[in-house]
């Protein structure tokens, strides 16, 4: 009887030891995956998106149930132009953590890229109503852009102005308002909005391009030429530089 009891105690101790070892391994794996995820985020912050994706995939092979990692994977795939995989990972992040508003905002942005306006509006509306979300001016601005693309200019301006009420110096909202005024042919207001955007984001080449186009519509050709040339000088992206130079040349040759 004593021998039988001893064997039972030994089995119990072994079971507890194995459970403790498994728990420790799980914690160690989670910490290792988080360290790899941090490295991937550092690469992404440097613009090394392929390296970032490689690290995120390594981390996923260790801990696939990390919602923050799934969001990172979604962002990485979106930066690589693969919206299908991007959406898949944002959805997985939300399945793991339904109140994860940054992932929902990113999902809305992916739908926006797909021109899936209804799905984008649904995502951004949920995020803007999240009282704990730290940057509600982002989904507000995204909603403004969706309505701008749909041609609902009044609704677009409403959301852009809501964003500016929350973040008075937010350049993306000023830029969006400028685009709405350009579409409506209200070029003086467009110039004012683009200039406000540049004041708060002086290195954003696309805003300079749109400001140059607004000056051109106003027949302010000298200002338009100078703005396009400045955009070309600032542009690191070859496509943007080429566009800015071409616009400057058109003004010069008018």
Image (spheres, grey):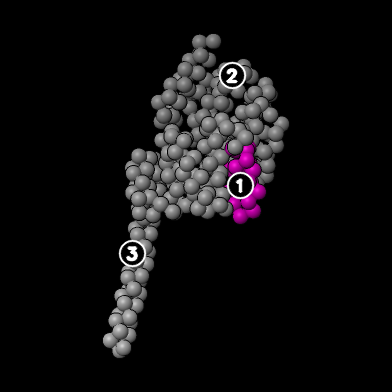
Residue 116 at what x, y percent from top left?
57, 32
As rendered, which of 227 and 88 lies closer to the eye?
Answer: 88
Which residue matches tag 1?
Answer: 127
Please state which of the two labelled residues, at mark 1 or mark 3, is closer to the viewer: 3
The residue drawn where x is 68% and y is 42% is 162
Magenta-drawn stretch, dominant element (helix, strand or loop)? helix
Total marks placed: 3
Q: Are marks 1 and 3 in contact (CB under 8 Å)?
A: no
Residue 142 at what x, y percent from top left?
60, 38
Which residue matches tag 2?
Answer: 216
Mark 2 residue element:
helix
Q: Which residues are magenta?
A: 120-143
Please state which of the two labelled residues, at mark 3 or mark 2, is closer to the viewer: 3
Question: Distance from label 1 to label 2 (Cα)?
Answer: 38 Å
Residue 163 at what x, y percent from top left?
64, 42
Mark 1 residue element:
helix
Please identify the residue farthest to the front as the structure is shown.
1
């Amino acid at each position: 009887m004593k021998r039988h009891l001893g064997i039972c105690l030994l089995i119990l101790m072994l079971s507890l030891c194995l459970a403790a070892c498994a728990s420790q391994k799980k914690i160690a794996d989670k910490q290792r995956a988080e360290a790899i995820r941090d490295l991937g985020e550092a690469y992404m912050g440097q613009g090394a998106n392929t390296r970032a994706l490689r690290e995120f995939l390594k981390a996923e092979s260790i801990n696939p149930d990390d919602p923050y990692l799934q969001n990172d994977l979604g962002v990485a795939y979106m930066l690589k132009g693969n919206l299908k995989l991007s959406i898949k990972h944002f959805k997985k992040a939300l399945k793991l953590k339904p109140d994860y508003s940054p992932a929902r905002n990113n999902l809305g942005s992916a739908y926006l890229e797909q021109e899936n306006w209804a799905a984008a509006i649904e995502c951004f509306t949920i995020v803007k109503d999240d009282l704990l979300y730290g940057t509600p001016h982002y989904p507000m601005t995204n909603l403004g852009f969706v309505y701008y693309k749909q041609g609902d200019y009044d609704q677009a301006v409403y959301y852009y102005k809501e964003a500016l009420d929350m973040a008075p110096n937010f350049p993306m909202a000023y830029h969006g308002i400028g685009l709405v005024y350009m579409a409506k042919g209200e070029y003086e207001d467009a110039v004012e909005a683009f200039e406000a955007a540049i004041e708060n984001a002086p290195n954003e080449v696309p805003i300079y391009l749109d400001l140059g186009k607004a000056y051109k519509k106003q027949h302010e050709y000298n200002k338009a030429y100078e703005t396009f040339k400045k955009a070309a000088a600032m542009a690191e992206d070859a496509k943007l530089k080429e566009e800015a130079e071409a616009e400057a040349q058109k003004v010069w040759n008018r």
